[in-house]
Amino acid sequence: MSHHINRRIASLRELIKGGLHQENLDKMVAECNALSQDTSFVLPFFVLKNVFNELSSALDRGAVAVEQHQDLISNITESAILILNKIEKNELVEIEILESIARDHVRNINIFRSDR
Amino acid sequence: MLANIKAKSRLLSILQEKSVSHGDFVLSSGAKSTYYVDCKLTTLDPEGAWLVGQVMHSLIQKEAEARHLEINAIGGLTMGADPIALAIGMYSFYVKDSPPLRTFIVRKTPKSHGRTKLIEGNFKPGDAVVVIDDVVTRGDSTISAINAVEQAGGKVAFVAVLVDRQEGGRQKIEDKGHQVVSVFKRNELIGANVTSHQPADCVPA
């Protein structure tokens, strides 16, 4: 992985650590979309882009209660960082990891929508 | 004048009743707050929209007259600004402004097909524009609208908002050279005993 790409991945990771709120999510979507084209890790970045994009859409109506927000993003930050760490080391991102983040996201977003 | 004072007072009551929620919230900026103002519940209410049109039209007229400006069009970032801009435009027609204020919408992202433009509606390059917003917090969404208007060839006369949360957004916009006028400030809406914390103050999720 080139130094330039690793720097972008590190920036994306810092953005994720900064919080999965709408303003950050919109930037994450754009960067994952770009990285899916600029690296060979098409599927992991495609999955991350779609997770972040759906989170952003879910939050598009404005503020949410802190508890609801925590439910919405439960396990997503940790899984996303795990995926980025593997990509950074040029390691294979196993399908089980991608399924895990997708499963958590689908569960979270359905709970979130049913609560509103 | 008296009618406008009454309208503003009634609008404040509707905002307090319908749009202010207390609790622990995460805002779209990531800041945490003990209250949330959802202006759409007021601006999309028939009486609320009528009063918003009347009160904000008066605010814009007063500011424009004081600065000897002629305003052509009003609009802001979708979707918070949309019902406000239209309410002002309709009120402008009702009071027989000649010509009435034209209204437009600023998209958050460019249309993916056609002319991929950011501004929809009744806007022309060269227009003197008042940029509208429902709530100003950090000012980023308002600044996005200002940038879109300027990139499309408009001249931003000033910014008019319904509620200023008094969290630095107004200053940020004014630092970019655009004066901000507001109908209500946070203290008028909910009093002084409220808090907000920027993301840096929060434990990352």
Image: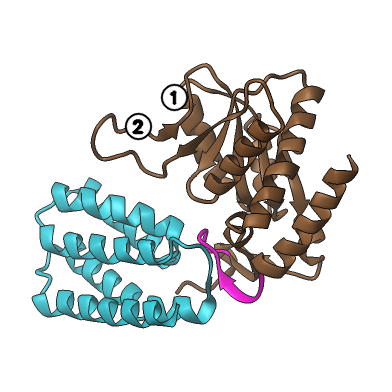
The residue identified by callout 1 is B152
Most extreme residue toward the right is B2
The structure residue drawn at horizontal position 62% and vertical position 26%, both measured from the top left corner, is B100
Q: Look at the numbered discs 2 and 1 and tell me whether their residues touch, using CB distance below 8 Å.
A: yes
Is B30 situated above or below B82? below
Residue B27: in magenta span: yes
Quick check: A40 left or right of B155? left
Whether residue A8 is visible, yes or no, is: no
Mark 2 and mark 1 lie on one chain; the one further toward the N terminus is: 2
Measured as percent of width and height from the top left, residue A32 is found at 25, 55
Question: Quick one: B160 or A5, which is closer to the camera?
Answer: B160
Residues rendered magenta in the picture: B20-31
Q: Secondary structure at mark 2?
A: loop
| Amino acid type at mark 1 | Ala
Write the residue at 10% across / 75% down: A94
Give the residue drawn at x 67%, y 35%. B94
> Residue A115: x percent and y percent?
43, 82
- Measured as percent of width and height from the top left, residue B194 is found at 74, 69
Among the chains, which one is cyan? Answer: A
The hue of chain B in the figure is brown
Chain letter of disc 1 in the image = B
At label 2, the amino acid type is Lys
Q: Nearer the viewer, residue A39 or A1?
A: A39
Using the rendered view, name the quadrant where residue B107 is placed: top left
Query: For numbered disc 1, what is the local secondary structure?
Result: loop
Disc sitting over residue B117 in the figure: 2
